Image: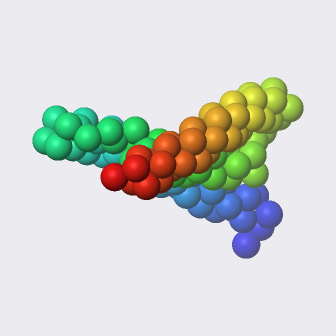
Amino acid sequence: MDMEMIETILHTAVHTAQIILESMGIIILLSGGVGCFIEYFATRKNVRLILAKRISLALEFLMAGEILHTIVAQDMQDLLVIGAIIIFRFILTWENSHEIKELEEEELSIEKKE
């Protein structure tokens, strides 16, 4: 096997793994949104915490896909775009984790009152 063939195989494997991870993130995001929408109208309870957790999980899968993309990035421009996407998704995940923490504390305080 020559080096070019190994590089092609690696590129294909990484690209395939990236697509799988990002697809999983999209599926989690969509199913979480639809599930929470249905749950809200079925029970009329606050589903923000459940939705926030699902969004956080989806963002983790999407970030993993972008990190894999850095392996096969062709030039500096690709790396800058990927880096910006990763930073943006990290900020979203960080903000979402703080919201989850606040919602969990709020839920605990409601349970203690009951």
Point 43% across, 55% down: residue? 112
Residue 45, how many percent across, how many down?
Answer: 26, 41
Residue 97, how many percent across, how many down?
Answer: 61, 45
Considering only vertical position in the picture, is 32 above or below 95?
below
Q: Can I make out residue 93 in this image?
A: no
Quarter of the image for residue 7 reads bottom right
Point 75% across, 29% down: residue? 84
Q: Nearer the viewer, residue 3 or 49?
A: 49
Q: Nearer the viewer, residue 57 or 103?
A: 103
Considering only vertical position in the picture, is 2 above or below 19?
below
Query: Which quadrant: the N terminus?
Result: bottom right
Which residue reaches farthest front?
A: 113
Q: How many marks?
A: 0
What scheme was used to colour the molecule? rainbow
Q: Can I make out residue 1 in this image?
A: yes
On the picture, is 86 further left or further right than 44?
A: right
